[in-house]
Amino acid sequence: MEYALVTGGSRGIGKAICLRLADMGYNIIINYTSNDEEAIKTQDLIKAKGVDAVLMKFDVSDTAEADANVEQWINDNKDKSIAVLVNNAGIRRDNIMVFISPEDWHRVLDITVDGFYNVTRHVVKSMLSKRKGRIVNIVSLSGLKGMPGQTNYSASKGAIIAATKALAQEVGKRGITVNAVAPGFIKTDMTQDINEADYKAMVPMNRFGEPEEVAGVVAFLVGKDSSYVTGQVISVNGGLYS
């Protein structure tokens, strides 16, 4: 009874990851914050594949909520295990630095950085006891090269890249791998305000990516073929310079 927990799993890249991992036979725990309708749709699609799908509604940036949901699930399901964790939850609140409000600065970092800590610390403890596990953090091109108008977002994703490399060294001896996937321009709700026609010329492949193309790399990183891959950041950006 192995489960994959995907934060921000109801829509976009997170949804595509949930569906791909379900195809691999994993039962799925879908974390989400607010959109019940989309979460239920994703849950139904996963169950149609013949695996279990659990909805886990909480704000990853809230330590108490994470404790109450993730730790409680682990304690209540001793016959099951979270074998895969995908830290995907994140938001954009773009602006140039001088106009970023304290609220927008902290909200972006709280969800990505605090969210990573709040969820991972419970799951990795369980993985260490079982001496196995896969952790994949969804970062961004912005965390690798920085993007103007995204100082807050770039800072949050850059922090997770560094955390990925550090955690991989801590847990490698217990058979746990920790990697990151850095998407470029991907067609999701998060990028719907970016005009593909205006920006695709920046991309050598001359198009935006699909969520399923990110999910495919995540699938590799949680599969057997990546058993000796850890502490890495894999870009999925159509060749865009990073």
Image (cartoon, rainbow, N blue to C red):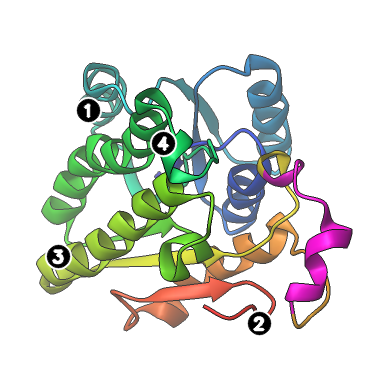
Residue that badge 4 annotates? 108
Instruction: Give neighbour class at mark 4: few <14, some 14-19, many 20+ (Cα, 10 Å).
Output: many
Instruction: Give neighbour class at mark 3: few <14, some 14-19, many 20+ (Cα, 10 Å).
Output: many
Residue at screen point 41% across, 27% down? 101
The image quarter containing residue 63 is top left
Left or right? Give the position of 26 relative to 192: left
Question: Residue type at mark 2?
Answer: Gly
The mark that comes first in sequence, 1 or 4, is 1
The mark that comes first in sequence, 2 or 3, is 3
Instruction: Give neighbour class at mark 2: few <14, some 14-19, many 20+ (Cα, 10 Å).
Output: few
The mark that comes first in sequence, 4 or 2, is 4
Residue 18 visible from this viewpoint:
yes
Residue at screen point 51% across, 78% down? 242
Say which element carries label 1.
Answer: helix
Residue that badge 3 annotates? 171
Instruction: Give neighbour class at mark 1: few <14, some 14-19, many 20+ (Cα, 10 Å).
Output: some
Residue that badge 2 annotates? 239
Magenta stretch secondary structure, dominant: helix
> Magenta stretch?
191-203
Left or right? Give the position of 99 relative to 203: left
Whether tag 4 and tag 3 are in contact, CB under 8 A, the answer is no
**Distance of mark 4 from mark 2, alpha carbons?**
26 Å
**Distance of mark 4 from mark 3, alpha carbons?**
27 Å
**Distance of mark 3 from mark 1, alpha carbons?**
19 Å
Residue at screen point 36% across, 67% down? 179
The mark that comes first in sequence, 4 or 3, is 4
Question: Residue type at mark 3?
Answer: Val
